[in-house]
Amino acid sequence: MKNIAGLTLVCGTVVLIPLPTHAKRAVVTAVCGAIGVQVGPMTAAFANSLGMTEIYGAILKQPTPGGPAAAAGIEAGDVVTTINGSPLSNWRDFAPAISMMAPGTTVYLNTWRDGQLMPVSVTLGSAPCPATPANPRRPRASRSS
């Protein structure tokens, strides 16, 4: 059995790093997918202003400059309605869905902007995983992903 210097957990996959002979302990880090944008809940008024017939999805706030969302052309006020073809019925499901994917993965989002549905592909960056699993049923303020 090899000594291991570090374990990096990337969305359920462990990456092993060999341990130098002089090292005494291993380090475990967890890395999750991220796009660099905060999300908020959809409202009836905002859905109507976009011409949406149903209230679902997540409103994206200002993307982090230079982050994956900004590089993909996402703008503040865009509304995500699907992630990889799966409907996003609750805005609280957005961050957990993104963080479960590996950094470097391309994610396909359907977004509404100015009354039009626009497909957007985003290559995920990385961020430290939350210390505790996200609970999509617990009310909380907006989260970054």
Image (cartoon, grey):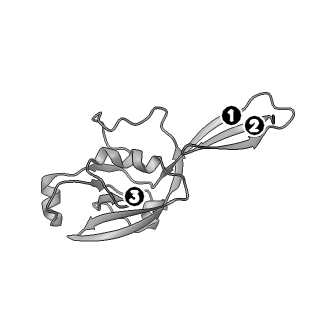
In contact (CB < 8 Å): disc 2 and disc 1: yes
Q: Is residue 78 above or below residue 101?
A: below
Q: Residues within 10 Å of mark 2 (few under 14, many from 20)?
A: some
Residue that mark 3 sits on: 63
Horizontal side of 75 relative to 122 (left or right) equals left
Secondary structure at badge 1 equals strand
Among numbered discs 3 and 2, the one appearing first in the sequence: 2
Q: Residues within 10 Å of mark 1 (few under 14, many from 20)?
A: few
Residue 5, numbered label: 2
Q: Residue furthest right?
A: 21
Among numbered discs 1 and 3, the one appearing first in the sequence: 1
Horizontal side of 18 relative to 54 (left or right) equals right
Horizontal side of 9 relative to 50 (left or right) equals right
Residue occupying the point 61% across, 38% down? 29
Residue occupying the point 55% across, 59% down? 104
Question: In which quadrant of the rendered view does residue 114 lie?
Answer: bottom left
Residue that mark 1 sits on: 27
As shown in the figure, which amino acid type bears the numbered disc 1?
A: Val
Among numbered discs 2 and 1, the one appearing first in the sequence: 2
Residue occupying the point 46% across, 32% down? 132
As shown in the figure, which amino acid type bears the numbered disc 2?
A: Ala
